[in-house]
Image: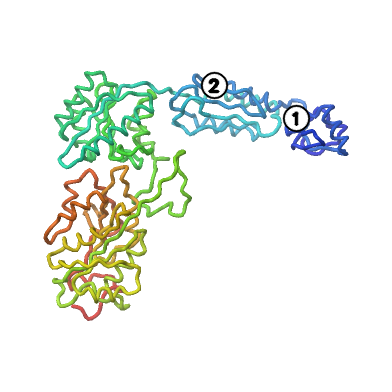
Amino acid sequence: MKFGPAPLDEARGAIMAHSQRVGTTMIRKGALLDDVAIAALREAGRTEVVCARLEPGDVPEDIAADRLASPLVSPLIARSRAATGRVNLAAEVPGLLRVDAAKIDRLNGVDEAPTLGTLPDYAVVAPRDLVATIKVIPFSVPGHVLAVAETLARQGPSPLALHPFRALKVGLVATELPGLKDSTTDKTIAVTEQRVTQLTGTLMPPLRCPHAEEPVARALSTLLADGAELLLIVGASAVLDRRDVGPAAIVRAGGEIVHFGMPVDPGNLICLGRIGEVPALVLPGCARSPTLNGIDFVLTRLFAGLKVTSADVMRMGVGGLLKEIDSRPLPREKAPATPRSGAAPRSAPTIAAVVLAAGRSRRMAPHNKLLVADRSGKPMIARVVDNVLSANTRPVLVVTGHQHEQIESALAGRPVQYVHAHDYAEGLSASLKAGIAAVPPECAAAVVCLGDMPLVTGRMIDRLVSMYDPEEGRLIVLPTFRGKQGNPMLWDRRYFQEILEISGDSGARFLTGKHAEAVCEVEMADDAVLRDFDTTESLATLPPRLRPEGVG
């Protein structure tokens, strides 16, 4: 193909390269320059025109796109007619698209002229959804190039295969524990039914039972007897091991465990099993959320009639990071907020920080540990509050009590709000309750920080905040180091009333056992979240720049 300006005398039969308005006539890109078009250009005073002139052996774009599309069509995938060098392929039914990426790459590697773009492998599609497009970039393709591409496309099956969703009957077992609200289970059932319905399935009447192996196994057997073609278990507490309640119940019901866990987040703690030929899944905590997570990776394949093996799950890691993870502090902090679907991005909830600074520091008497200054002259409480202020938590509430005037003086000029705990002498619970009671109603949660932990950074606090997600049931977030739980702790507002009922010299950590299903542990890179400094001996273990002088 020759491309470029050509005298009008030589342009007859060529292809218009760029749309042009000539008088009242619009000659569009791709139009054939016939006698009428040439005459209009002459009348407008043009002597030449930028055009494409086909040479012997060249195949026009529409014919080339049509020929290349033919071997790519497969059952349940329809094609459009060729126009402007393009043929679109679309789904005829809802299902899961499989794409042979290696073959697509080979087709695109034949030459730059013919191109083939597709949806990702394992894409979920609805009827009439575009799954691929063939586009010829120039106005023609050399015949020998097209012949090579056609031969490659006809070798073996089409690289595009649509697996239609099957209308499966799905059985659901929801387990219950004391303290688990019925509303939480109701929401999880509703979200699960929505998932099943969207995949053309039907959710059988859910069975609720205690969170124990024998009753869950019995419920699974009942659902199988009623014709369930897929079994789901939603636990009141997240599954943590192959021998946990859900997996053990599958085995007890005569099944086996295929795989535990997956390299997808959210969705890590999923368990895949089967009872005979019926898949049986123990769902992770993110089952409570309708947003995309690892559950969908598995369910879409099962509904499409594809077997999910242990090896399949292990290959889900690429593309499996669906949200921020605790090992990377805010990896997309500066990235634009682009939603994964047509839904509008959610606004981040407002989270307060409560700094407890009311204690009498009896273990370091006669010194007040919070007022002990490091070598730069900064008191411990000032360093703690500065770290908290560097995090994305607002407002910052400082609870005072013992020597409150000196504490406020040490924090002078900082944008914090003071909450005085008048009964601070009664113990830790008094200052904790004062701080929680002062959290503004517009805040969804609060991070409770201890005033004697100066090594906890704002970035660590932000990592806790990034894991908080009410929709996924991550309502209590706490840090760990090598499996040991530390501070600070984030509490969703729904637990504030229980915190306000605590008494004595204790905090709220005991509530994590009562609400284990809502706890999200975030493993930290160092032990700062375990280290408080409330004795003179402990001060000697601070980093040199933070170590005070004259205390010991």
In x, y percent, where is residue 434? Answer: 21, 62
Rendered-image quadrant of the N terminus = top right
Question: Residue most toward the front?
Answer: 441
What residue is rendered at 25% in x and 39% in y? 184
Quick check: 112 above or below 458?
above
**For numbered disc 2, what is the local secondary structure?**
strand
> Residue 32 occupies which quadrant of the picture?
top right
Q: Position of residue 526 (x, y in %)?
A: 29, 59
Instruction: State which quadrant residue 436 falls in.
Output: bottom left
Q: Residue at label 1?
A: 31
Q: Quadrant of the C terminus?
A: bottom left
Taking the image as drawn, is residue 328 in sight?
A: yes
The residue at the point 33 percent across, 22 percent down is: 168
Residue 157 appears left or right of 212: right
Q: Amino acid at mark 2?
A: Ala
Q: Residue 137 bears which disc, if any?
A: none
Q: Relative to 66, does residue 375 appear above or below in the rendering? A: below
State the residue in front, 302 or 145.
302
Of the image marks 2 and 1, the number of the one nearer the N terminus: 1
Query: What element does badge 1 sit on?
Result: loop
Residue 197 at x, y percent in the picture: 36, 27
Name the residue nearer the viewer: 453 or 469. 469
Residue 319 x %, y %: 42, 40
Regarding residue 452, the answer to whether it shows in the image is: no
Disc 1 marks which amino acid? Ala
Measured Cα–Cα span from mark 2 to mark 1: 27 Å
Q: Residues within 10 Å of mark 2 (few under 14, many from 20)?
A: some
Q: Is residue 253 left or right of residue 170?
A: left
Q: Which residue is mark 2?
A: 78
**Coloring scheme used:** rainbow
